[in-house]
Amino acid sequence: MLQNEEILLISYFLAVILIMVVFGMVFFTAFQRRKNKLIQDKLKVELDFKAEIEKSKVEIQEQTLKNVAWELHDNIGQLLSVVNMQLSLMARKDGENMQQHLAEVKSLVQSTVHEVRSLSKTLNNEIVQVMGLSRSIEVELERIERLKYAKTTFKINGEQKPIKEQDEIIIFRIIQEFLSNCIKHAKANHINIVLEFTEKLMYLSVTDDGCGFDVENKSESSGIQNMKSRAKLLNAKFHLTSSQNQGSQLNLTYNLLKDE
């Protein structure tokens, strides 16, 4: 028969083993829950990012259609109206001034063709994917200049580095939102965009000399919140400054090496 001390020792030993098994099961369960949560969180971030990409694409397309409507009305429509007037005048004139009127009509038609070709560049629904970020910015600023909304400048400092196509779409949409506000509300005379590249970072600066606004009172507006949330998806630093009659400035710092 086992002695009482031996029975007690075995009981303690079994109890220790049981406690270790229970602790191991609890630890394993907690670890699995933590692992599953991390997987779910990562999946949610990926799904949110994909959803934002699609949303940005749709908004770029919508903005493109608005741009087309503006250009058809403000540029091409006016040019064609003048062509029509010139043709009406020609129909009532004799031959002595015909060559001059023909030259004027020819010049107007050439200008219209140029405007249509310029407009066709913005009709591409995948402008960023096709042209890249810098060229897409140039096309957008060329449109603003063409419609005489404001004077623009665009500068690239440093050697351009590749940016993920999906990230370029979101960055361009942030820029487009800021430019839209410049045109609609700021009444700016000049818009300036600078892209600066270093080995690890890309700095974006967009400024206007418009009427400005109170950032504190406007911080909850949908446009500002959209820009902030998109920058957050990119893990980019976003900063917007403005004051009454002092213009506005958007600064974005994007990590070129974030996926390495």
Image (spheres, rainbow, N blue to C red):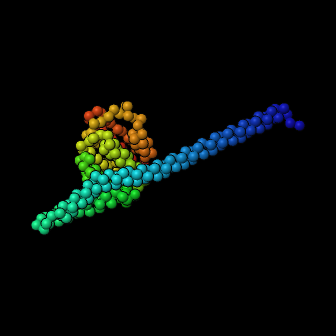
Q: Is residue 249 visible?
A: no
Instruction: Give 137 or 77, whichever is nearer the viewer.
Output: 77
- Answer with the quarter of the image where residue 38 lies: top right
Q: Is residue 104 above or below residue 179?
A: below
Could you tell me which residue is drawn at 30 percent across and 44 percent down? 183
Q: Is residue 254 above or below residue 247?
A: below
Instruction: Give 197 or 96, whichever is nearer the viewer.
Output: 96
Number of labels in the image equals 0
Could you tell me which residue is drawn at 49 percent across and 50 percent down? 51
Q: Residue 192 at x, y = what percent?
A: 26, 45
Could you tell me which residue is drawn at 13 percent across and 66 percent down? 94
7 relative position to 24: left or right: right
230 relative position to 181: left or right: right
Q: Residue 83 at x, y = what percent?
A: 23, 60
Query: Residue placed farthest to the left in the image?
Result: 96
Q: Is residue 63 visible?
A: yes
Q: Residue 255 at x, y = what percent?
A: 39, 47
- Answer with the quarter of the image where residue 105 lies: bottom left
Query: Residue placed farthest to the right in the image?
Result: 1
132 relative position to 75: left or right: right
Could you tell me which residue is drawn at 57 percent across and 46 percent down? 40
